[in-house]
Image (cartoon, helix red, strand yellow):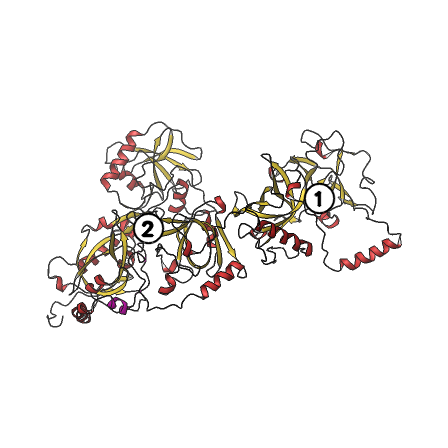
Amino acid sequence: MPVHVLSEGAGPGAQVPKHLSCVSIALISTSTNFSDKTVKGKVLRKCPLVSSASGDFILKIIIQEEVSPPDASPQNPSINVILFGAIAKDFDGAVNQGDVVVAAGFTVGKSPTVQKDKLHPFNLLLRGDSACIYVSPPPPPVSRSSPAAKRISSLSAEVSRKTKVPKYTYVGLGDLTAGSVVNVYGVVVFFKQPFKTRGTDFCSSLKITDQSNEKISCSIFCEKLEDHPKIYQIGDIVRLHRVKVQLFNSSMTLVKTFGFSVMAFDGAVGGSMEPRTSSRSFSFDQEDRKRVEELRSWASDQSLLPPSPTMPLCDVQPKAYFDLTCQLLAKAPIDSTCTLLRVWDGTRSAHTLLKVIVEPDATEGPSSFPPERERLIANILAYDNHVEYARQLKPGEFLRIYNLRAIPGSSKVPGLTSSQKELDHLAFHLHGGNAFGRGIRVLPEDCPDVQEMKRVMEACPEDDEDDFSALNDSELMEIWSTPPESIEPSLLRAQIPESARGEDAETSESINTDCSSSTERRCDHDTHSVSLSEVKRSGPAGVHHVRVQLKSYEPQKLHQSLKLYCSKCSTLQEVPDDEMLAGLFSEASRDSGPFSPPDWAVSGQVDVPGNPPGSKTRTLGVHLSTEFMYKQLLFLMGSSLEETCVLSSGYQNIVPVRSSGGQLTLLHPSAPFLFRGTRTYYGCERCSEAAVREPVCAGGGRILDEKIIAEALGVVPLRFVLLMKLELRDVSDSLHVFLWRSAEEFFGVSAEDAAANQEAQDIISQSMDSLCPAGGSTAERPWMDLCLTKYQSVDDDGLNQICYQISHSTFTRPSAPPNPTVSASQR
């Protein structure tokens, strides 16, 4: 049996073979043979038994030398012991924390966790038949022979039936000594919400003080968020159990040790005594209550606590940094680095707030609110590391957002085009990082601050959908996105003077509804069709249904309607033409110099197919990934644009490259980074950090696609989009509108297909020819039932401009050509 448990009171050395001698933990190293040595220590920590997939067992313990020899270094009295196989399983069932053990038959290996646990730089490893451990349970604390001992034993048995509440000793922050493990109370003067480290842990940072006026920093690393201190604001009180005092840069700091626990309390005098903790069992008696009350009273008389940065929306001024207590109403992703949080606190900002419109399908929570509520909602843009935390938030939760910034003027927001700014609007940004305690905390509903905020919310007037007096142009500025919720027709008509309404009212009623429509609306807006003149005179934003004809459109060359769009930086650019691309390929082939191919690549040559008969076969340099040898991925060098297109029909993925500075690089930022058959893929020059690297596919047999290749090359892909400007007309007026966001829905083809597929191009061309045929009278052109979104934006000169966009409408292709014998009266 590899684990030998000795009788009670017997020393662990009683049955250890005489030829084995004990060695100090401090002398353990890999340079010594320990085949005839043992190590003795007390079990400080026993981790759970782990079963591997192969059915083997692993167990980790930490032992500490009880008495170090005089010549031994005191720096590493504790060491990790790792047990494998049968000895691990036997040890788990036979040994408890506090037992004294003697380990024999071990080997020594380097500890990979020495920087983290600060224990011995080497581990003891016990495995196989030669490894064994002798165990001695701790001696009884008192003699059982006296009557007093019997009474104590009886009392202990009675107490053991109940929950044992240990008695803790607390050390003042002015009495800390380096190396000690202590329990402390303190008032929080600074804190950071838990943030993700590079490993598996989250880290909390805080600074506390007490009546000694010493300010002590504390760093807490825990894998679970619930194990971190639940601190809501500066002035809260924390109780820390089993923290180790360390000297760092000549200052005392506290770090978590085994058995660590934390509890937090409201710091306000007379506040709740309810502890904030994730522990199911904890001690908190009258003495603890007295300590909390004393700290509250002391802190309230001190000037050490800065003014609270928490303020309601109604008090926020431009350029301010503040903490906001609020309720989350809805949220939506803007892009991979930004999430929109729609919140309110029952108060209304004195400033015009930024309006952000997103896809309703992307919104978690209500996508729209009654106008009265809408005026109380703030849109918060959370960036970078806060995006991951925001994904876990649920609409309806109460939040405190720390170090929020109120930005006036023209700061950019994801989703805006280059000409759209936040001019004259106040935007709220939660920047990336955790400096100054920046972050988000979910508050419980019974939190005093939440209860106060709910009282303010309940005092808000009831939503009145007919009260539109507060609407103004600047409040209704919107980003190019999907339409806002529909505005009632009664509101649109109410904005037209009565004297001017008559003719257009008759016009809108007399719009030709007998003719069939060439388009179909796909929206759910409950509104009637209005004339274009009514649309123009309506408010600065809204959704309108119209029945119109197409008077003209731009661009006339439909291939020019294809653009490249970056969803990360929201830029729109032209697609390079073949002449420009041919020049880039030609220049790259001339300028290529010597280089060193990557270690992962196999270099070779490929013949260019299609050479004229009798001419010399042209070969090109290629580099293949060793991971994807069979025609899956080819790095092509020295080819022309035409040759690359020819080769792309025979290879699944071609990446054009050149040599620069002795290394392989992508051909050019403006050239496609990938050819896949007839499709080409471009990258954003602004957002990409391009480099030639080998893609890595998780999972056997996974097929390479453009996303995997772009990620490996450090390229942010651009997306093909369609953008057209149409001039619409009806009997009352004409109007210029854009077809962009809903262009693919309108034509029934994707922009990516239109860039690579002649059939898709023909569908767009035929649709426009049907709506706007060459020659003939404009009045004979087909009618269209469209959904129009009206919105306000700001041009490059900072001036407001009204824009219109077609949305939720689809072109319906005629099943048969129109009958030429239909009379004018029938039309």
Pointer 2 or 1: first along the chain: 1
Is residue 559 shown left or right of residue 648? left
Which x, y percent locates residue 186?
61, 47
Who is closer to the viewer here, 253 or 209?
Answer: 209
User: Compared to 117, does 545 lie above or below?
Assistant: below
Whether residue 58 is visible here, answered yes or no, is: no
State the residue position of label 2. 422
**Secondary structure at numbered mark 2:** loop
* Amino acid under disc 1: Leu
- Main SS type for the magenta part? loop
Which x, y percent locates residue 114?
62, 37
State the residue position of label 1. 44
Q: Which mark is residue 227?
A: none
Which x, y percent locates residue 290?
66, 54
* Amino acid under disc 2: Glu
Task: Give the magenta part as a residue range.
Answer: 474-495
Q: Does the magenta stretch include residue 475?
A: yes
